[in-house]
Image: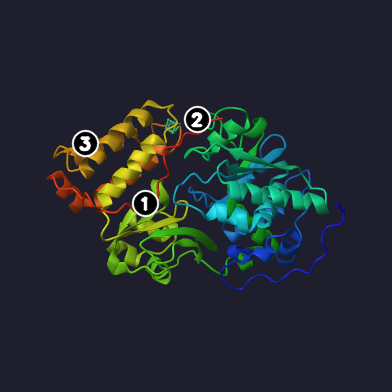
């Protein structure tokens, strides 16, 4: 039965320790009444932007969790200053194969994400929210659909919110690709206007990752001071990491920013003496040698010492019995197959890199292959309409540096035929671009 009354509930106090986002995990808390009990009511969405909300996000120091780590408040300011009424897009495409945090949040805490989207809409003065989820992530789609329906059964939505299922491609979640698709085109990146200026329906558009918006919901509710009680002064708060590989308990973990990587690995059942390297930041990310991993902390500031950053929060521990050269070649081959086929340097450059790294892995490459690969990395960088070539070049350079000795052995004709495959890679995508 439809009621115009919102569920009347008492609000629980702010969580004093981690987990914060994942404290909404128990199944019994996924419904709206339980969520409201925990999370309280939302700020009002008005026609005009709400600078007070943007300032709260600014004071919290929140950075985006989709890979770029941009200041969330600065993005909001740019959208709020745009001409015309804004649109908010919840980016739940999560094309990174080893990442599962956004789908997990959508399944286990959909109302928290929707609250974050509405808070962001209030901040920038938006009059609609679009929730974009990978069209093959059926559990996440069902969860959001149910949550939206549940809200409507209690109260009219302050602004329209709709769910869309986006094509399954690595680059579908790139912001210009997502906007292009929402405007009726293919889910391929473009290098025309940035979405904050001219996005969905040519209106200023705020695209934020699922996890980012879940943090926004909590900041608006419990304040920037509370948010900063964990993390580091320059990178406050917690972050979700999708941890897999040589650990006993692969899962999505919520950690304070600045946490020791070695400690996180140990607490999830990994042993540094059985790990040869750690991939941080996903397939646009970088390899840390075991020595560097022992020292590193999970913040962009600390990881910069190793030329790395948190990216989308993927962390994969490579066991000693696996081969970093083979694993890197597999990833580069997958990245090459993920091209949107629009830019010559991406299509041809990535194909050449994938062929040659594959030959290195098989012990069949010419002795100067590493030099040739470095040259190609330089040539493709900055040459695509999106960051796929840049990400691949960065990953390639990091592979050649972290596995320098193994690469030398392979270039002398050795190969690791029986090495187990560790990095998760989906089958090549057959989905359409529309
Ligand atoms: S760089 Fe590659 S993936 Fe990006 S738009 Fe160009 S062809 Fe597509």
Residue that appears at 43% across and 38% down: 387
The answer for how far apart the CA atoms under marks 3 and 2 are is: 29 Å
Q: Which one is nearer the viewer's eye here, 425 or 116?
A: 425
> What residue did someone put label 1 on?
423
Query: In the figure, is residue 336 to the left or right of 56?
Result: left
Q: Which one is nearer the viewer's eye here, 337 or 10?
A: 337
The answer for how far apart the CA atoms under marks 1 and 2 are is: 31 Å
Q: Is mark 2 within 8 Å of ligand 1?
A: yes
Tag 3–tag 2 contact (CB < 8 Å): no
Tell me the element at label 1: loop
Q: Is residue 123 visible?
A: no
Query: In the figure, is residue 92 to the left or right of 34?
Result: left
The answer to which image quadrant residue 104 occupies is bottom right
Residue 191: which numbered mark, if any?
A: 2
> What residue did someone put label 3 on?
372
Disc 3 residue crowd, few under 14, some 14–19, many 20+, Cα 10 Å? few
């Amino acid at each position: 039965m439809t009621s115009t009354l919102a569920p009347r509930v008492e609000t629980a106090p702010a969580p004093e320790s981690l987990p914060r986002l994942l404290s909404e995990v128990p199944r019994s808390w996924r419904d709206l009444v339980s969520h409201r009990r925990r999370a309280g009511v939302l700020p009002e969405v008005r026609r005009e932007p709400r600078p007070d909300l943007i300032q709260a996000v600014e004071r919290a120091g929140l950075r985006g969790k989709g890979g770029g780590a941009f200041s969330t408040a600065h993005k909001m300011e740019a959208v709020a200053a745009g001409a015309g009424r804004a649109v908010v897009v919840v980016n739940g495409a999560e094309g990174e194969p080893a990442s599962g945090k956004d789908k997990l949040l959508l399944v286990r805490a959909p109302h928290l994400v929707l609250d974050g989207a509405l808070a962001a809409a209030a901040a920038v003065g938006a009059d609609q929210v679009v929730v974009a989820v990978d069209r093959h992530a059926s559990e996440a789609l069902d969860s959001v659909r149910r949550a939206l329906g549940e809200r409507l059964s209690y109260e009219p939505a302050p602004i329209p919110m709709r769910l869309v299922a986006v094509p399954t491609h690595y680059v579908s979640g790139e912001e210009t690709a997502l906007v292009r698709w929402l405007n009726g085109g293919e889910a391929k990146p473009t290098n025309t206007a940035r979405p904050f200026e001219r996005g969905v329906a040519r209106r200023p558009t705020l695209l934020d990752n699922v996890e980012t918006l879940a943090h926004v919901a909590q900041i608006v509710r419990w304040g920037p001071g509370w948010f900063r009680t964990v993390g580091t002064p320059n990178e406050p708060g917690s972050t979700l990491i999708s941890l897999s590989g040589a650990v006993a308990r692969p899962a999505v973990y919520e950690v304070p920013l600045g946490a020791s990587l070695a400690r996180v690995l140990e607490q999830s059942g990994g042993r540094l003496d059985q790990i040869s390297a750690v991939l941080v930041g996903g397939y646009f990310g970088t390899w840390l040698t075991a020595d560097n991993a022992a020292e590193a902390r999970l913040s962009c500031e600390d990881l910069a010492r190793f030329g790395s950053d948190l990216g989308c929060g993927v962390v994969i521990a490579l066991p000693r019995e696996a081969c970093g050269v083979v694993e890197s070649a597999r990833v580069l081959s997958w990245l090459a197959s993920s091209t949107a086929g629009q830019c010559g340097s991406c299509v041809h450059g990535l194909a050449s890199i994938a062929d040659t790294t594959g030959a290195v892995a098989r012990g069949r490459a010419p002795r100067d292959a590493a030099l040739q690969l470095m040259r190609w990395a330089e040539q493709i960088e900055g040459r695509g309409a999106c960051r796929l070539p840049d990400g691949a070049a960065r990953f390639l350079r990091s592979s050649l540096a972290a596995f320098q000795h193994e690469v030398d052995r392979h270039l002398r004709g050795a190969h690791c035929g029986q090495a187990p495959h560790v990095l998760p890679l989906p089958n090549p995508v057959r989905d359409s671009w529309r």
